[in-house]
Amino acid sequence: MARMKLMTKAIEKKAQKQFPMGSDMEQMVVAKFFNPTGGWTWYLMNQDPNDTDYLWGIVKGFEVEVGSFSLSELTNFRGQFGLGIERDRFFKPMKAKDVFKALNEGKHI
């Protein structure tokens, strides 16, 4: 079975353009990654253009938090049934502050 490509050139371009914004919640979430056999989800805000493994965004795991995560860890992760992390191909970019608020209200994004 072919593995899903988590990052496209378009996503990388948007994420890297926002890197100078750091943790500013006015920026857009440009991609959503999820574990199809678990409850964790990562919402990508930006990516370091000089270290493309370094991603920043909102993480919904045991709680909702903002922080860094690693592209290589997402890419190499294998969960139940050997399934990896997937990208939500139907996710529409939205403001980080709106994603954060909705997740903290228990809504599904």
Image (spheres, rainbow, N blue to C red):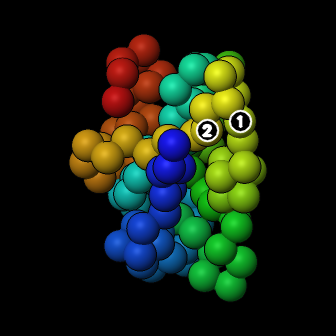
Question: Which residue bears the numbered disc 2?
Answer: 84
Q: Tell me if residue 85 comes above or below residue 26 in the rendering.
A: above
Density class for disc 1 (Cα within 10 Å; few <14, some 14-19, many ≥20) is some
Question: Which residue bears the numbered disc 1?
Answer: 78
Secondary structure of residue under mark 2:
loop
Residue 105: horizontal and vertical position, in percent? 41, 17
* Relative side of 73 to 65, left or right: right
* Residue 105 badge: none
Q: Tell me if residue 25 comes above or below residue 38 in the rendering.
A: below
Q: Residue at x 45, y 35 (%)?
A: 100
Please name whichever residue, 38 or 66, is drawn nearer the observer in this view of the structure: 38
* Quadrant of the drawing holding the C terminus: top left
Q: Quadrant of residue 49?
A: bottom right
Please name whichever residue, 73 or 68, is drawn nearer the observer in this view of the structure: 73
Amino acid type at image mark 1: Arg
- Return the residue found at the far bottom: 50
Please name whichever residue, 55 or 81, is drawn nearer the observer in this view of the structure: 81
Q: Residue at x 26, y 43 (%)?
A: 90
Amino acid type at image mark 2: Gly
Q: Residue at x 70, y 67 (%)?
A: 53
Q: Quadrant of residue 11?
A: bottom left
Whether residue 64 appears in this view of the structure is no
Q: Tell me if residue 23 comes above or below residue 64 in the rendering.
A: below
Residue 43: horizontal and vertical position, in percent? 49, 45
Q: Decide which of tag 1 and tag 2 comes sooner along the chain.
A: 1
Q: Does the residue at mark 1 contact the one at mark 2 (Cβ under 8 Å)?
A: yes
Q: How far is the residue under mark 1 from the one under mark 2?
A: 5 Å
Residue 87: horizontal and vertical position, in percent? 44, 45
